[in-house]
Amino acid sequence: MRVWIDISNSPQVLFFRPLIALLRKRGHDVSVTTRDYAQTIDLLALHRIEHEVVGPRHGGPGAVGKARAMASRLRALRRYARGRGLEVALSHASHELPKPEGGGHQAGGAAGAKTAAKLPDTVAHDPTLQDPRCVFQLLKKQYSRYTPEVVERITGIPKDQFLKAADLFTSIRKDGDMKKAATIIYAVGWTQHTFGTQIIRAAAILQLLMDNALKFSKAKIEVSAEPMGEHVRIAVKDFGIGIARDQLEAFFKSPI
């Protein structure tokens, strides 16, 4: 079977990587296309996935630029697919993926979910999510192993301290309590970068500072950024009562 997979963004590399390996292991001919956007090409090279760059780069932040780039890439993808005898086409957003010649199957997620073709009869699916092999049940099984005991064994954080932190975090905003602030940043593409943990840590700190600033300064806050060589200094200023100087050192210490 000739399969075409189009990967247009960094997170999709890790999403499609197991499928690409499985299909190739079973003897299928898999072609992978991509675009020059974010860390997509670097990640494909890092995971040694053969690929071909098709179409222009990202169209930028503006709607007009995005529309032009999408139209241009759609034409490029159609030229790529022409005459290759592809039987199955897969992408994360099927609005860009042309249907394979010869009546092959096309499937897409995200933006293409509403218009994706009906699954063939040979593909098992369970809309009730009760089948033990469906993605939902597999994810439940995957995460069920992360008990407090496993967290303690892997990270070294004592079980009682982890439970205390978990209880504190899950109590935030509970029953309308607006005196606490917390954030979880997930699935925004940063995690695929080689220094993704640093990016997420910095963004989490910034969001917490902004949330706390808004809590004590209802009218407005000021967020400023100042280039400092290879770095950027970001400051959050509120107009509340502030923190006493003798308490500043304790502000950066862990509560547990």
Image: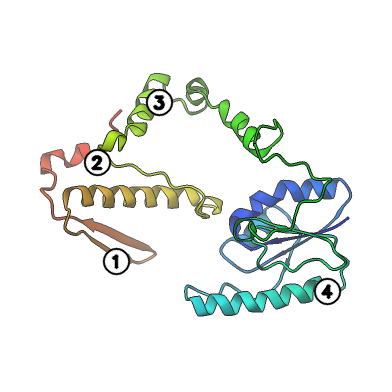
What's the amino acid at mark 3?
Phe
Q: Name the residue at 76% across, 74% down.
A: 78
What's the amino acid at mark 2?
Met
Q: Nearer the viewer, mark 4 or mark 1?
A: 4
- Disc assigned to residue 162: 3
Question: Where does the image place residue 70, in percent across and percent down from the top left?
Answer: 61, 74
Asked if 15 appears above or below 132 in the picture, the reply is below
- Badges 4 and 3: C-beta atoms under 8 Å apart? no
Q: Name the residue at 30% across, 38% down.
A: 173
Sequence-wise first label, 4 or 1: 4
Report the Cα–Cα distance between label 1 and label 3. Answer: 37 Å
Mark 1 neighbour density, 10 Å: few (under 14) some (14–19) many (20 or more): few
Sequence-wise first label, 1 or 3: 3
Could you tell me which quadrant the C terminus lies in?
top left
Q: Nearer the viewer, mark 2 or mark 3?
A: 2
Q: Nearer the viewer, mark 4 or mark 3?
A: 4
Mark 3 neighbour density, 10 Å: few (under 14) some (14–19) many (20 or more): some
Q: Which residue is mark 4?
A: 82
Quadrant of the rendered structure where residue 126 is?
top right
Q: Nearer the viewer, mark 2 or mark 1?
A: 2
- Disc assigned to residue 226: 1
Q: Name the residue at 59% across, 31% down.
A: 140
Residue 116 visible in rendering: yes
Question: Where does the image place residue 19, in percent across and percent down from the top left?
Answer: 75, 48
Report the Cα–Cα distance between label 4 and label 1. Answer: 50 Å
Mark 4 neighbour density, 10 Å: few (under 14) some (14–19) many (20 or more): few
Secondary structure at badge 2 equals loop
- How many marks overall? 4
Question: Quick check: 26 left or right of 19?
Answer: right
- Disc assigned to residue 178: 2
Report the Cα–Cα distance between label 4 and label 3. Answer: 56 Å
